[in-house]
Amino acid sequence: MSIDHPAYILIFASIISLFLAFYAWIKKQTGAGILLSLLLFSASLWSMFYGMEIFSSSEGVMKKYLFVSYFGISSLPVFWVMFAARYSGIDKWLNPFTILLLFLIPVSTIFLVGTNQFHHLYYNSLSVGSVNGFSFLKLKNGPFWWVNILYSHILIVTGFVFFCEAFFQGRSWTAYPHILFPGKCNFTIHRECALYFGF
């Protein structure tokens, strides 16, 4: 198997993210540090189990890895917007009630992915495809998939807005690198897999 196989890239990225998550947790001095650690852990979870899914060839095993990866996929945008709000100082709206609301769709997503075979609300169909001798899950998106995608992108854009506002108002001149974080992760993962599988 070639070293540039997407699975290797994803698992390597997962290990780096996990190391950074532990480092951020150990060095945490503020609420933003804790949220950064959780954000990185979500990214690590997503990358690790997505990579393991690509390594697998059994449909049953791949579905299990897909389910576990959704704990990272669905929570990452929430931790991103919370981290952006806390880091940029636009966090007065963050309280236990609003945090609970932020996690309603992610929790619903995880539940629907785990029980998809009974209702097909998240994926209309799942089957195993093959490209260049390697297997992957061919997914036909259901209605709630679009709900989750829309919600996730709204949170990501909101986090961008928080950092941009902090940057241009001079509250945090170190905000600029963080503005690029979710877009770079999202783009890298999808670009590598799209190029390899021809999507």
Image (spheres, grey):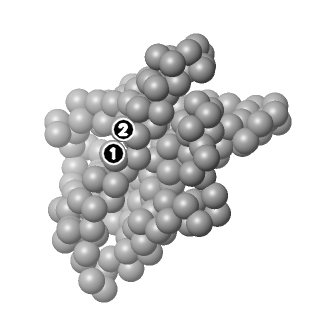
The tag on residue 153 is 1
Asked whether the viewer can see residue 69, the reply is no
- Residue 198: x and y in percent read 17, 36
Q: Residue at x 46, y 47 (%)?
A: 77
- Residue 191 is left or right of residue 104, and the answer is left
- Could you tell me the amino acid type at mark 2? Val
Q: Quadrant of residue 31?
A: top right
Q: Would you say the residues marked 1 and 2 are in contact, meaning their CB atoms lie under 8 Å apart?
A: yes
Q: Quadrant of residue 106?
A: bottom left
- Could you tell me the amino acid type at mark 1? His
Foreground residue, 10 or 25? Answer: 25
Asked whether the viewer can see residue 77, the reply is yes
Q: Residue at x 58, y 30 (%)?
A: 88
Q: Residue furthest bottom?
A: 118
- Tell me the crowding category of disc 1: few under 14, some 14 to 19, or many 20 or more residues within 10 angstroms, Cα based: few
Foreground residue, 82 or 62? Answer: 82
Q: Secondary structure at mark 2?
A: helix
Q: Does 138 appear above or below 54?
A: below
- Tell me the crowding category of disc 2: few under 14, some 14 to 19, or many 20 or more residues within 10 angstroms, Cα based: some
Q: Quadrant of the N terminus?
A: top left
- Residue 179: x and y in percent read 46, 25
Foreground residue, 106 or 163? Answer: 163
The tag on residue 128 is none
- Residue 5: x and y in percent read 38, 32
- Residue 99 is left or right of residue 132, and the answer is right
Q: Does 58 appear above or below 80?
A: below
Q: Residue at x 34, y 66 (%)?
A: 59
Judging by the rendered image, the residue that carries numbered circle 2 is: 157
